[in-house]
């Protein structure tokens, strides 16, 4: 027991020391695992075998395809068309451009599955326009960042694929369906807040509503939105696996961007491939090193220790859910989202199930928690992208984000304690059969 305790200390302390020292997260995970393995006297060959095993998963093949499809659609003209469609729908409201921003994020997030890609793509277009129309630059940037978190919930989402892989026998189709209502709910909550802010600050309205404009813009945007249809319907109906639907989505994205919208040129495609490979390399290294880290956590009985500590403090499901949310919110401020999913899921999921949470429900709660972490200093990736796109310092953005944080936390509490909001759609369309 003494040996196990010391091994846990080596694993945890070396990991957090390297995080504080600004080591890349994959190196922090890998090196702390190496130190612990050496201390325990386990064969080093086991590390290599576990790393290969971590990425040798068929379901994982969906991740690169989703990443590439999102990059292609972002570079191929989909952003401007979604903005036009969103403007025709809600631009006539008070604070119309803020509403447009949120609705466009709802659509674009369902294509890219990435909060940072959403912020970078839509932010470069909408933030300058909003500033020119009289919106505060902090508000314009913050609403772009917070609404982009919808992209993590609304399918397709490669982060949900990774969660399903780590969690075990969790249906990707049910996860995709479970994210739709919370994603839309988050967008509606931000729209209510934006309307109140627009009235208070006298932000302008857009052009009057016209059904002809809606129809015209929908015809243009529909080609890109078909991507979501391919993925979600293909996976939910069982006609396609997540990997197959993602591969078809890439082919469709190339056809739409290059031959229909005619905005995906060879130089753009080369940049898309470069960005996709860069993102994919980071994800794959994280997955392989996290496999070793996760195996060591199980070997050292960390899930049982954490569960025992939490259950020793309280056995009330409501308080257990609160503690889990606080833990994930705290982790989201200091770690990358993918790393948390890979490392923390094996530890926290058993505790959540003890509190009566379905793994699908818990997955959506995890994704929203970590999405909030993406706009929270000091490590928030979306926060850095928003600052870079708008030119507003991170310090100013963080101070003015407080109201939006409040809105997002209210949605988080709601979906945590009212599981029917998350589960009714997957239970309706893909019910779990008795005995499975």
Image: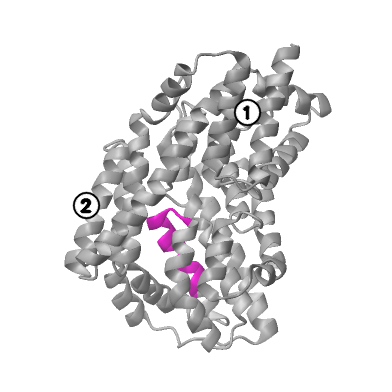
* Element on which disc 2 rests: helix
Q: Does the rendering let one see residue 255?
A: yes
**Which is nearer the N-term, disc 2 or disc 1?**
2
Mark 2 → mark 1, Cα distance in angstroms: 37 Å
The residue under the point 62% across, 82% down is 136
Q: Is residue 88 above or below residue 401?
A: below
Q: Is residue 204 left or right of residue 58?
A: right
Q: Is residue 305 above or below residue 287?
A: above
Residues rendered magenta in the picture: 100-114
Q: Is residue 152 left or right of residue 200?
A: left
Q: Residue 34: horizontal and vertical position, in percent?
A: 56, 26
Q: Does the rendering let one see residue 363?
A: no
Q: Residue under circle 1?
A: 347
Q: Are marks 2 and 1 in contact (CB under 8 Å)?
A: no
Number of residues whose C-alpha sits closer than 10 Å to that of mark 2, classed few (under 14), some (14–19) or many (20 or more): some
Q: Is residue 101 above or below residue 349?
A: below
């Amino acid at each position: 027991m003494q040996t196990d305790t010391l091994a846990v200390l080596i694993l945890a302390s070396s990991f957090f020391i390297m995080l504080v020292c600004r080591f890349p997260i994959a190196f922090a995970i890998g090196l702390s695992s190496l130190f612990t393995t050496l201390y325990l006297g386990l064969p080093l060959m086991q590390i290599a075998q576990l790393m290969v095993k971590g990425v040798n998963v068929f379901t994982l093949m969906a991740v690169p395809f989703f990443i590439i499809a999102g990059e292609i659609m972002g570079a191929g003209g989909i952003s401007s068309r979604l903005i036009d469609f969103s403007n025709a729908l809600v631009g006539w409201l008070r604070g119309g451009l803020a509403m447009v921003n949120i609705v466009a994020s709802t659509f674009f997030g369902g294509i890219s599955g990435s909060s940072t890609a959403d912020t970078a793509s839509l932010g470069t277009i909408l933030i300058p326009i909003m500033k020119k129309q009289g919106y505060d630059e902090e508000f314009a940037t913050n609403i772009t960042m917070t609404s982009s978190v919808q992209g993590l919930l609304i399918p397709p989402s490669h982060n949900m694929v990774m969660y399903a892989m780590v969690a075990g026998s969790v249906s990707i189709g049910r996860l995709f369906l479970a994210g739709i209502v919370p994603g839309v709910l988050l967008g509606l909550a931000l729209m209510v807040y934006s309307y109140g802010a627009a009235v208070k600050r006298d932000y302008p309205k857009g052009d009057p509503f016209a059904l002809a404009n809606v129809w015209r813009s929908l015809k243009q945007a529909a080609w890109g939105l078909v991507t979501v249809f391919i993925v979600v319907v293909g996976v939910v109906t069982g006609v396609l696996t997540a990997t197959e639907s993602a591969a078809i989505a890439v082919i469709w994205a190339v056809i739409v961007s290059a031959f229909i919208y005619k905005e995906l040129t060879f130089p753009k495609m080369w940049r898309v491939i470069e960005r996709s490979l860069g993102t994919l390399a980071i994800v794959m290294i994280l997955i392989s090193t996290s496999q070793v880290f996760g195996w060591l956590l199980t070997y050292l009985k960390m899930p049982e220790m954490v569960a025992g500590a939490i259950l020793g403090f309280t056995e009330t499901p409501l308080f257990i859910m609160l503690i889990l949310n606080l833990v994930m919110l705290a982790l989201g401020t200091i770690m990358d989202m993918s790393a948390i999913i890979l490392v923390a899921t094996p530890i926290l999921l058993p505790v959540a199930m003890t509190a009566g949470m379905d793994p699908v429900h818990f997955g959506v709660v995890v994704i929203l928690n970590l999405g909030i972490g993406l706009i929270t200093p000091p490590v928030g990736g979306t926060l850095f992208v928003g600052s870079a796109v708008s030119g507003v310092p991170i310090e100013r953005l963080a101070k003015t984000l407080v109201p939006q944080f409040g809105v997002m936390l209210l949605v988080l509490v709601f979906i945590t304690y009212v599981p029917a909001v998350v589960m009714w759609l997957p239970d309706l369309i893909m019910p779990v059969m008795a005995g499975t």
